[in-house]
Image: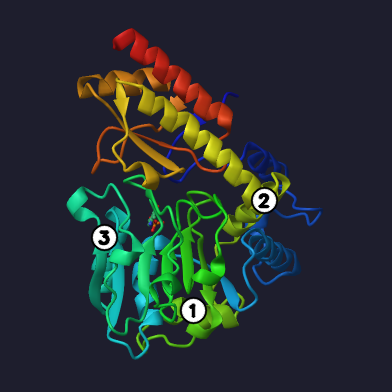
Amino acid sequence: MSRVWNFSAGPAVLPEAVLRQAADEMLDWHGSGMGVMEMSHRGKEFTAIAAQAEADLRELLAVPANYRILFMQGGAIAENAIIPMNLMGDRRVADYVVTGSWSQKSQKEARKYAEVNIAASSEASGFASVPAMAEWKLSADPAYVFTCTNETIGGVEYPFEPDLAQIGRGEVPVVADMSSHILSRAIDVSKYGLIFGGAQKNIGPAGLTIVIVREDLLGRAMPHCPTAFDFKTVADNGSMYNTPPTYAIYIAGLVFQWLKRQGGVAAIEVQNVAKAKLLYDFLDASDFYENRVERACRSRMNVPFFLKDEALNEAFLAESKAAGLVQLKGHKSVGGMRASIYNAMPLAGVAALVDFMRDFAARRG
Ligand SMILES: *Cc1c(COP(=O)(O)O)cnc(C)c1O
């Protein structure tokens, strides 16, 4: 067996130790005589798995006691509808900060359920930056302010936490799509009303959506909100109103345990900074490659880059693949290349990429 260095944006690389443990436990989880996929979600085995996963996530992100952790389905894209359906309450307007493809998609979907005010947008600058909070034009009484704190496609990450208290609007809940950088860096959960993300970038398999929501925001769902997507129903039923994505929760739980063994979020953040620095420093020193995102807003997780001679793109992709470095093709809307270097990508993988890129440039430059 040989494993590649997998730079996929998602579904993405998982820690090898997690995959090995899951393989070992595939037919018989802890002497139960069953695999996790075969268990009732209400049985004592799976209930314990889910409770442990939730407790570990709460510990890793230091989630305060007045926040609920929900394990849902539908992915981040479904949340684009589920969130306004749950949070609008009797308000009319929701504010959106648009910093790339994902927040753009979110504000479009929200228009089915709310009047959307674009509080700030970096579209004019080609989504290469994050508008400073001082420039955000919030409406008078928005239900929430929506942000995407790491734009997976553009490779743009907030260099600050969107703490509205700093602009005198601390009463407005901040919603953050953290799909592609949750658990990659320390955050202060208390600054947010709701954090959400699909699991398949930095947590585990596709099919699981994590929602972390402040308790006072529960119980405001629109009458036509599907019951299975009403945050209060999900919370009141311990994420088991309907059958949850049990195997995805189990794998996510193994990833949380792995992350704790690495030293938790603070320790993985140190590694993530080192990985990103290695790659960006190389790109900046090169006259063969470039990254076009404003330096302060460059994502530590998703690194889009371009060959200055785009005629070499196909050769770059073919040769990198032959060298065991895969999924480097950029998103079709951006072009070029993209290396996603999530928590489970070791420094050695990024070093292998940089070595290949240096060699390719020397041969083709
Ligand atoms: C991948 C991604 C999504 C879409 O997730 P789905 O699981 O396909 O719904 C939304 N937002 C961000 C930031 C993402 O990275």
Identify the coloring. Answer: rainbow
Q: Amino acid at mark 1?
A: Phe
User: Mark 1: is the Cβ under 8 angstroms from ligand 1?
Assistant: no
Of residues 246 and 263, the one drawn nearer to the viewer in this rendering: 263
The residue singled out by tag 2 in the image is: 264
The residue singled out by tag 3 in the image is: 104
Q: Residue at x 55, y 67 (%)?
A: 189
- Left or right of 99 on screen, residue 196: right
Measured in 3D between alpha carbons, the distance from the residue under mark 1 to the one under mark 3, in whole angstroms, is 23 Å
Q: Does dot 3 land on a helix, a strand or a loop?
A: helix
Q: Vertical placement of 297 versus 286: above or below? A: below
Outermost residue, top side: 363
Measured in 3D between alpha carbons, the distance from the residue under mark 2 to the one under mark 3, in whole angstroms, is 32 Å
Q: Vertical placement of 310 versus 107: above or below? A: above
**Numbered tag placed on residue 231 in the rendering:** 1
Q: Does dot 1 land on a helix, a strand or a loop?
A: helix
Which of labels 1 and 2 is toward the front?
Answer: 2
- Ligand 1 placement by image quarter: bottom left
Quadrant (top left, top right, bottom left, bottom right) of the N terminus: top right
Q: Residue at x 67, y 45 (%)?
A: 22
Q: Residue at x 30, y 11 (%)?
A: 364
Give the mark nearer the N terminus: 1 vs 3.
3
- Residue 145 position, x and y percent, is 36, 72
Give the mark nearer the N terminus: 1 vs 2.
1
Q: Residue at x 37, y 27 (%)?
A: 283
Measured in 3D between alpha carbons, the distance from the residue under mark 1 to the one under mark 2, in whole angstroms, is 28 Å
